[in-house]
Image (spheres, rainbow, N blue to C red):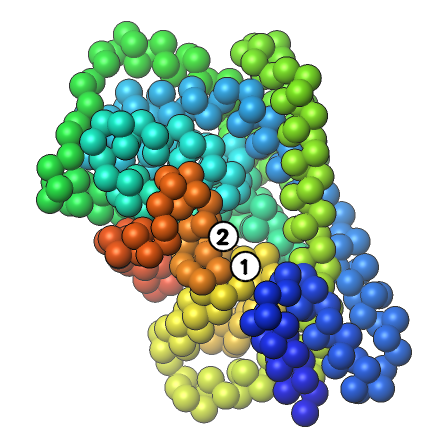
Amino acid sequence: MELWILFGSFVLLLLIGTPVAFCLGAASFFTVLYMGLPPVVVFQRLNSGISVYALMAIPFFIFAGDLMVRGDIARRLVALAGGLVGHLRGGLGQVNILASVMFGGVSGSAAADASAVGGLMVPQMKARGYSADYAVNITVVGSIIALMIPPSHNMIIYSIAAGGRLSIADLFTAGIIPGLLLALSLMVAAWFVARRRGYPTEPFPGLRILGVMFVSALPGLLLIAIIFGGVRSGIFTASESSNIAVVYALLVTLLVYRTLGWEDFKEATFGAVRTTAMVLMVIGSAACFGWLLAFLKVPTSMIAFLQGISDNPLVILLLINLTLLVLGTFMDMSPLIVITTPIFLPVAQAFGVDPVHFGVILILNLGIGLCTPPVGSVLFVGCAVGRIGIGEAMRSIWPFYGAACMTLVLVTYIPALSLWLPALFH
């Protein structure tokens, strides 16, 4: 009965439009009352869920990314991407995807990527004769590349949800090859769609101009190297690297580019505070919800249930992926990581799946959910930037969904794609 109350109240609140954080917290509160436990347990668990030192990295990475957006780094990265791949079929579409790879290494946020890169690329693509749906679809699905490569905030959340035992450096490293594979698959899909629709290519600017573009974008690209290199080498932790990222972003935008004004700094600060408050509220509420799931022995029951269906790890991973894809259609990513990790990670480990490998599967899977209605937050951002309806975008997004899902299949069933690179550092 406790599970009926927990899930029933959560779904009911979600259906009437209650914010996810309040759905999770209220459902946990109702369940605790029914079980006869002290209501203060809910607040204790919420507090313990956000009182984790590693979470300090999230607000500072968000702040650093926002400073870079307002400090003109996104435009310079897009220009460099244009010089590198604009001459391929579907020119600006290919530029959009490569810019997402570069900017994702600065922001670590799919929504920020869709807003920044989309804000620059979608108007240009529409002006050059690309249809709005093509521009939006590439922007939306390409933005989930940011979830896979350092500094991915969601990798940090997964590490904490897994009990804080997993190395954030290993998770950062594990996502690089899958992230690049996702970019490559999306570029192939963009090529085929552009060829069918007859979209143009862009002229190659020449090596000299390309060199100028690279030098202009280099300070932003160095941030990626500083974050990844410092964490991977053990010079500083993920939390310390986030502070360094903020200082570096301020130095670049104030002293190198000289594009960050006082108003931009204030907006970046307030924006980071608002985003952090929302993220931490969701994480805390989800931590309480996840504790109840563990208390009610849901992970143990799930292992027994799936073992009753099959003892083949390939089948189990397929079932987990399908379940996560469905869940991703109506819940945001952060709470799903906190809720589903304690349920499915023990299942995956029981069938011999490495927890770092499972983390990459989870992040990529739930990233696809961000592009899926009815609660695909990145899809909403992309459609708002492109000024088209969700229905119009959904009619032609399938080639890009297909590319993302094919990447998910490869990452799921070829563990070396995630584990080979971290193994080189051990």
Q: Position of residue 183 (x, y in %)?
A: 33, 43
- Rate crowding at label 1 as few (under 14), some (14 to 19) or many (20 or more) other CA atoms within 10 Å: many
Q: Is residue 63 above or below residue 44?
A: above
Taking the image as shown, residue 398 lies to the left or right of residue 426, namely left
Q: Foreground: 50 or 164?
A: 50
Amino acid type for the residue under numbered disc 1? Asp
Q: Is residue 259 left or right of residue 378?
A: right
Nearer to us of marks 1 and 2 is 2
Quarter where residue 199 is shown: top left
- Number of numbered markers: 2
Q: Tell me which corner region of the image, top left, top right, bottom left or bottom right, holds residue 26.
A: bottom right
Q: Position of residue 112 (x, y in %)?
A: 51, 39
Comparing 160 with 390, the one in front is: 390
Question: What residue lies at 17% left-to-right and 45% top-to-bottom?
Answer: 193
Residue 425 vs 263, above or below: the answer is below
**Above or below, comparing residue 97 to residue 321 in the picture:** above
Task: Report crowding for label 2: few under 14, some 14 to 19, many 20 or more residues within 10 A (C-alpha).
Answer: some
Per the image, label 1 sits on a secondary structure element best described as loop
- Marks 1,2: beta carbons within 8 A: yes
| N-term-proximal mark, 1 vs 2 | 1
The answer to whether residue 218 of the structure is visible from this angle is yes
State left or right for residue 395 relative to residue 3: left
Residue closer to the observer: 183 or 231: 183
Q: Secondary structure at mark 2?
A: helix
Name the residue carrying label 2: 377
Q: Is residue 286 visible?
A: no
Q: Which residue matches tag 1? A: 332
Q: CA distance from mark 1 to mark 2?
A: 7 Å
* Of the pair 289 and 413, the residue shown nearer to us: 289
Name which quarter of the figure residue 90 lies in.
top left
Q: Position of residue 258 (x, y in %)?
A: 58, 10
